[in-house]
Image (cartoon, grey):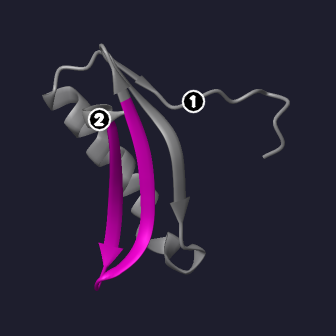
Amino acid sequence: MGNGALIRVARKNGRTIAAILTLTYKHSVMYKYGCSDARFQNLGGMQFLFWAMIQDANQRGFSEIDFGYLSVATPG
């Protein structure tokens, strides 16, 4: 995947609290996978990483961000 794949990691005091994998292709950034440590959800690690992804996509001139498919029938 070369430069098209990026792993972003959020840390608090050296401990990993969340991470996401994004892929880029042509004019799009796609959120592919993410995870977080439930003990630190109150810190907003995933939200921080999504915001960093959005800012980076804007700075790099991407015109589309794909957060993936979610069906209405998917259990929440």
User: Residue 8 in the image: x percent, y percent?
Assistant: 33, 54
Q: Mark 1 or mark 2, which is nearer to you? A: 2
Q: Mark 1: which secondary structure?
A: loop
Q: Distance between the residues labelled 1 and 2?
A: 21 Å
Report the number of discs. 2
Foreground pick, 26 / 66: 26
Q: Name the residue: 44% across, 65% down.
A: 18
**Of the image marks 1 and 2, the number of the one nearer the N terminus:** 2
Q: Mark 2: which secondary structure?
A: helix
61 versus 19 height, above or below: above
7 versus 35 height, above or below: above
Q: Which amino acid does label 1 sit on?
A: Gly
**What label sits on residue 2 in the rendered view?**
2
Foreground pick, 35 / 48: 35
User: Residue 61 in the image: x percent, y percent?
Assistant: 17, 20
Q: Which amino acid does label 2 sit on?
A: Gly
From the viewer's perspective, tell me whether residue 12 is left or right of residue 30: left
Residue labelled with disc 1: 68
Residue 69 figure quarter: top right
Q: Quadrant of the N terminus?
A: top left
Q: What stretch is highlighted in magenta?
A: 5-23
Q: Name the residue: 28% across, 85% down.
A: 13
